[in-house]
Structure formats: C-alpha cells, structure tokens
Amino acid sequence: MRDNSSTFYADFFGGLAGAIAVLPQTIGLSVLLFTSIGLDASSGAMAGLIGATILLLSSGIMGATTGMISAPNGPVTMLLAGLVVKLSPDYSHMEVLVILGAVLFFTGLFQITFGLLKGGEVIKIIPYPVVASMITAIGILMIKSQFKQIIPVETIDGWSRYIPLIVAIVTFAIIYIFKTCAPKLPSILMGLLGGIATYAMLTFSTSSRVDPNWVIGTLPVINVEAIFHRFDGLHLFQLPWQLIIVSALALTVLVMIDCLLTALVADTQTFMRHNAKKELVAQGIAQMLIGIVGGVGGGGTKGSTLACTMAGGRRWSPVFAALILILISIFGREVGAFLPLSALSGVIIYIGLKMINPNILLWFTGRYTRLDAINAIMVIVVTLFFDVTKAVALGMIFAIITFISRNMQRSLIRRQTNITEYPSPRRWSEQHGQILKGHGDKALLIELQGSLYFARTDQLYTRIMEEAQGRQVIILHFRRVSSIDMSGMVILMQMVEMARKNGTEIVFTHLHKRLGFGKKAKKAFASIERNKEWSHIIIFKSTVRALEYAEDQILKSQNIDIESKRDIAYSVEFENNELCTTIDTTGISLLKEIAVKKRYNNKEVVLSEGDSGTSIYMVKKGCVERRLYNGRTSYKVLAKYSPGIYFGKPSFFGLGPITTRYVAQGETTLYKLRKAEIEQVSEKMKAGLYADFLFSISRNIAYESEKLISEIQRLEAL
C-alpha cells in the first residue's frame, strides 16, 4: 500500500506526463480542424485545449477508468473535418462552428444514453474489419490534410521555401527514433521539441523570408461572454438537423469504440478494471459541455494514457493533467508564437501512419478472410471519396450479407442417426429387440443447430423431404437451435403436413423456452394460423420419450400389439427374466424361493442417491427408469428397465453408494434378490448356483460395456 503523499506525487507526475504527451496531438488536430473551416490556427489551438481540459476533468472526477487520458483525437477530428467539407459551401464560419457544436452535444447525449443502457456491449457487434478500415481511412485523410502545410511556398524564393517540409521530416524522424530506441520517453513531445528547434535554427537568419502563417501565433484570451452569445441571431430550425443527428450517431460509435479500447489499455497497466457505463456517461457529459462552449471534442488517447500510467499516474492523474493544461492556457499564451504548424504536421502524419492497418492487405491471402478484406477496402474507398457515415453503413450491410451467406453454407443438421445406432434406453425383450434392429432405419433422429430463419428453414425443408422417403418417424431435435423466426415456424408446419400425406410422422423434441415456445408449444404454432387444427403435432420434452415413441411406431407397423405389450400393461414371470438365461431350473427354483416380491406406485422411488445395499432387482411388471438428476426436477434418463429385465449390479457388488435414482413408471412389481441369501442358499444346497448367477451378470455387463463403447464412439464423432 502506498501512503497519501506518495500517491499524490505519483498522480501529479503521471498527470504531468499525460499532459505533455497529449499536448502536441491536441493542438495539432484542433488546428487542423479550425484551419479547414477557414479560421486562424491560434483559435483552433485554444479550442483544443478547452476540449481536452473538459474531457480530462469529467473523466478524471468520475474515476471510471484509472489513469486514462482523454483529449481531441484522430477519429473524432477527421469525422468533424469531413463534415466541415460538406457544410462550408452553404454556411458561414460561425454557422459551421455552431453545427459542429450541435453534433458534439448530441454525441454526448447519445453517449450517455448508450452508457446507461449498457451500450458498451452493443458496440461489440460492429465487425472488426469495419472498425479497422474506418480507422485506416481516417489515418489516410489525416496525412492528406497536412500536405498543404508542408508543400513549398511559391511566394518565397530560395531554399527557405522548403523550411516547413524540412521541419516536418525532422519532427517525424525524431518521433520514430525515440519510439524505437527510447520507448519510455514521450516520443511525440521529443519530436515536437526537435521540430521547434529545427524551425528556430532554419529561420534565425532568414526572418525577412519567413511566412507568418508558418506558426500558430499567440493563443487568444478565453472570452466567456462570446461563448454565451455565440448562438445570438441563429435560427435553429434552419440548421441541417438530419445531418447533425446522423453525424452524431456515427461519431458516437467512433468515440465509444475509442474510449473503451483506451480503457482496456489503461487496465493492462494499472491491473484494475474500468467501469464502461460510468466512463461513457462521464465522456458524454464532457462532449455536451464541449459542444456548448465551442471546444473540440475527442476521446481516449492510447499513447498519452500509457505515458501517464507508466509514470505512476492512477486515480487523480487525469485531473492533474487538466490543471496543467489550464495553466498553459492562462500563462502560456505566447508559446504559440514559437510553435510551427509544420512541426505539428510531422506529429499528425506520424499519428496517421500509426492508424493505418497494413494487415488489411494480408487478409486477401486467406481463404476465410478474403471477404473481410474486400469489405475493408470498400469502407476505406467510400470514406476517402464520400464520408465515414456512408462507409460504416455500407460496411455493416456488407458484413451482414456476408454473415448470412456464410450461415447459409453451414449445415443446419448437426447429426442424424437411426434408432439402431441410437436406441432409446428402454431394454426390450429379445423378440422386440430383433424387430427394432431389423427396421431401425425407418426412424431417424435429426439434431439441428444454428438459427432457423426463412431462407435456411427452406433448405431444411428440402433436406427433410428427401430423408422422409421410406421413413415412418423423423425426430427433429432442437436443443442446439439458437433461434427461429415466424417464417421458419410456418415452414416447419408445412413440413409436418406434407410428411403426413406421404406416410411419415415428424415429431419435435427440445423446443426450449429460448426459442419463444414456453410451456405451450402447440399454442405457439396455433397462434400463427388459427384457422388450422394443430393438435396432431407431436412434441416431446426429452429425446428419450421421442425415441421410445419411434420404437413403438415401428413395432406397431410390424403388427406387434404395443397397447397390450406396453411396459405398464404386461408382465414377465420370474423364470423368463434375462437373469435366468444361464441358470438351470433347479437354480431358478432356489432363487424364486428367496426372492421378495415388492410393488411400487407410479413415480415411487425404488432406489435413491446415496443408498447402499447388495441386491438385484428383477422387473416383473411395469417399468423402472434410471435417472441422473442435475437439479430438483431436471434429469437425464440413463436407462429404462422393462418387464423381463433386471438392474442393480453396482449395488449388488457393493461398489459404494448409488449415484443415480431409480423411479417406477406406472404400477410396478419387482423381485428383490439379496446377495447374502443367494450365497447362503448356494452353499447350503452344495450347488453352483452362485457361480451361474455371477456368470449371467457378467454376460450382461459385457453387453452393456459394448453398448457403452459404441455410445462413446458416437459422442466422439460429434
């Protein structure tokens, strides 16, 4: 833990480093914006300082992101500069300033709204290629905008006409050298100081041939009265409100992305977590104030944030940075007379180059990134020749179309199996099992995945109709379906109707709540077309029930009277149980004498989790389900024991407490055989009863092991 004095000094020096690092960028970008309007550079520099001060104070006082430095930045300035190009032919300088202020005001309002509504999460849906290409295009525009500042002046003769170009090159070179060789030092500040020194040396002996427009000039005094009277005589209804709102929305997206990315940069240095909601609200309030007073808006600045946090700045460092900028605005007004615009051009060109993402060209080499590369190039071209708002909109549309196209290519069917490969857990008699094995391909389980919207569901319709040929039952499994629209539901209903006419039943399982069906799935279908009767739609809550239904339908088709042979309706005598297959008649008689007959009501628990015992249970009548519960009422059916089947092998061998639950289905009658009594009878009668008994169990275990291996292989294939 640091004491208060060390914290104060660390925050102060962090704020000082942040202010020094952000000052060149703030002045350079603000001058760029104001000179594009046709106003003097000194007014732009002061407007930038005002904007940076308000952003730092608002963000710093709120304290949502530790150590983050905010100020006018490239994306915001270039979007506003592009807006100026549109407005200049039809509006005066003062009207353009008011319109820019309105854009910033509504940007702040939208930013606050997005922040309160957790809009930071919404921003994540904007595809990375759109963001990367937008920032790249803005970087190119920044570089292009500086050419007029550094090209040789025709009105000046001799080598001095090249002074701005030389200063810009020196500034850029120094920034690059310090960034590469001494990354801990503020490279932009070093470059700016080097540019100022170069300009001073080159102009020392050529004062008569120096253009006064090569420097910013003395910063103006802040006129509070002019700030409050800048709207006098303005007709608000004559402003281009549609352009203002659209530009504000585009700027909001840019500012939010930049703000949250910078917050992440700060988090990596401070090992703290930013509060996105509070940060967006704080910066939104700042943008609104900047719009009112006529400053230059901005957002997070990554380089300055790193300079601040690496110097030890934490909680109050942004506030200290703001106070330092205030002191510069009040007492450092004369500094502008020695600050060459060409040095700032070198800074801006460096920032612009850093914003360009060369990886966009590499995306063309990848099969899966080629469409993203095309989208990125398209956004860059539209931004350069039109504006960033149209570019982002076009990029989003292209990304959505690409997403739909890629989704269309992905199969809706995750897996399909017949009931021979994936039977229900119900154990049938040997006769019924052979019938199901021979006709298992007549029932198909199709597991779906992804989103079922209009175009994709039509593809599914075609595929299902092909698969329906020669099938009795098709089970559509919806657990991995993430969404379904109304068009998809209509096509599903058409699918059911058409399949019925061809003699195939389509049943649904796992129509979960996230799809919007709730507990009344049939009502959801009926609500689409109320003039039709949808009671014939068969819907199961679990895959097990659907598989059992399919098995029943196959047995019915083979003239097996399921109604009289159903688990809960028929019984199997003791000697016909599968346990007695390898035991002679004498042994069966001995076992029958010691067996205890027990009756259970529907849904009564036979064995529960944690129970222990050494008994085997033989099903005479009814059915027992083995369930694995993952909640109070939610469970998975692991096995289903019909009449003639036995269970309880883990308990019989004393392998520890039972981990699953055995529940009776319908009125159920069981025979219970205790291990101790079997051993006692076997020894007393001098018979090999116990050996035969174990042999029968081992055969059953071998069968179940093979079935388990088959199931593991099936799961591995998913």
Image (spheres, rainbow, N blue to C red):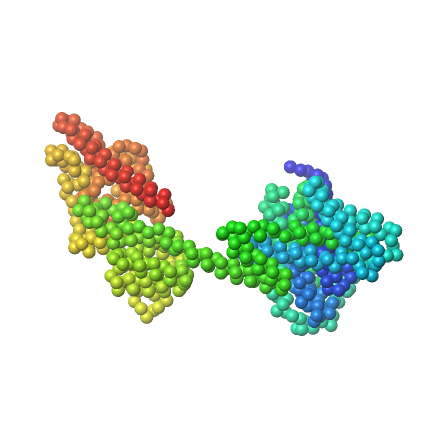
Task: Answer whether residue 20 is visible to the viewer in this image.
Answer: no
Residue 502, percent from left and from top: 26, 63
Which residue extends farthest front?
158
Write the residue at 72% across / 51% down. Answer: 347
| Residue 562 in view (yes/no) | yes
The quarter of the rendered structure image containing the N terminus is top right
Residue 82 in percent (x, y) is at 66, 63
Looking at the image, which residue is at 26% across and 42% down? 606
> Is 476 situated left or right of 157 in this image?
left
Q: Nearer the viewer, residue 209 or 317?
A: 209
Instruction: Name the residue nearer the viewer: 303 or 11.
Output: 303
Q: How many marks are shown on the rendered structure?
A: 0
Residue 619 lies, in percent from the top left, at 20, 43
Foreground residue, 500 or 585? 500
- The part of the image, by quadrant, that contains residue 639 is top left
Front residue of 670 and 358? 358
699 up-or-down from 278: above or below: above
Query: Picture coordinates of residue 292 (x, y %)?
Result: 70, 63
Q: Is residue 109 left or right of residue 606?
A: right
Q: Residue at x 23, y 55 (%)?
A: 553
Residue drawn at (30%, 44%), measured in percent from left and top? 638
Q: In the rendered view, would you say 161 is above or below 427?
A: below
